[in-house]
Amino acid sequence: MDNVQITTQLTIECKKITKSFGAWGEDVHVLRSIDLSARANEMIMLMGPSGSGKTTLLSIIGGILHQDSGECLILGKSINDLKEAEKTKFRGQNIGFLFQYFNLVPTLTATENAAIPLILNGHPRHEAFEKSAALLLKLGLDKQRNYSPKELSGGEQQRIAIARAFIHNPKIILCDEPTSFLDHERGQHIMQLLREIQKENHCTLIVVTHDQRILEFADRILEIEDGAIVHKSSNPATPKA
Ligand SMILES: Nc1ncnc2c1ncn2[C@@H]1O[C@H](COP(=O)(O)OP(=O)(O)OP(=O)(O)O)[C@@H](O)[C@H]1O
Ligand SMILES: [Mg+2]
């Protein structure tokens, strides 16, 4: 695929997504009508007050939660209409997740943690571990590759989580508050890493954040207000593809 095709390709198309929670009669309408499109190579930052539905939206895009109505096309497929097994496979191949809590498996080493998506996608273990070790080397974690998560600092754990999110080259990476537990310097470093890997992989990043200090990395900044997306700004500091 040439670069022009890559940059114009829509990877996410959400149209009129709604989602409510609660028992019949006392529903809380969290997402009222969400329209959101994203392209390959784009980093979108999603902001909004606590409880505005950011994690809910990421969960719908990631095929973890079903919308009540509206369409959510991921790489052209209506992810939440796929059968469960098909959805798990599709998600495993095409989507990477990065969370505020690093969610590393405490009984596995750094290398094993980062290799999880490849193993779930059926790659032979030795190949998965080799690829994981190479990625950790690139992320400056060679020395720590046999450490367990409790032996790693917060920044190191987050870099392992990044390796795990990207190792299978997914087209879409969904990040929920990826820097909120990190100090300024570590947060900047993590965002630079995300940008670099994104450029290599031509993927789409949606980053939910409250962290004003990382907004400079965004191509577009969107805000959820009253259950809908408000297009807040394009980031003038980021050159457009
Ligand atoms: N499974 C659930 N059952 C009932 N209510 C839920 C559920 N998940 C989320 N909610 C409600 O939906 C609203 C939006 O939650 P969500 O986690 O998406 O917000 P958020 O924007 O990510 O907030 P934060 O910035 O605090 O992480 C909240 O009022 C929350 O209580
Ligand atoms: Mg949230």
Image (cartoon, rainbow, N blue to C red):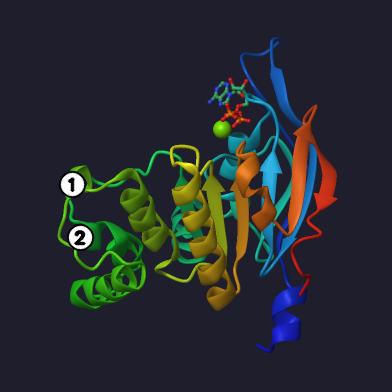
Please tell me how crowded label 2 is: few (under 14), some (14-19), or many (20+) other residues with Cα within 10 Å: some
Q: Residue at x 34, y 72 (%)?
A: 135
In what quadrant of the picture does the C terminus appear? bottom right
Could you say whether the residue bearing mark 1 is in a helix, strand or loop? Answer: helix
Image location (x, y in percent) of residue 26: 69, 10
**Picture quadrant of ligand 1:** top right
Callout 2 amino acid: Gln
Left/right of residue 97 with respect to residue 60 in the rendered view? left
Up the image or down, 134 lies above or below 211; here it is below
Q: Kindly identify the residue that appears in the image at 69 percent across and 16 percent down.
A: 27
Tally of numbered tags: 2
Residue 97 visible at all: yes
Q: Which mark is residue 151?
A: 1
Q: Where is residue 185 shown, x and y percent of the image?
A: 47, 49
Q: Along the horizontal axis of the image, is 9 left or right of 59?
A: right
Labels 1 and 2 touching (C-beta < 8 A): yes
Q: Amino acid at mark 1?
A: Glu
Q: Residue at x 20, y 63 (%)?
A: 145
Which residue matches tag 2? Answer: 144
179 or 122, nearer to the observer? 179
Q: Nearer the viewer, residue 201 or 35?
A: 201
Q: Is residue 14 visible?
A: no
Residue ID at (76%, 84%): 4
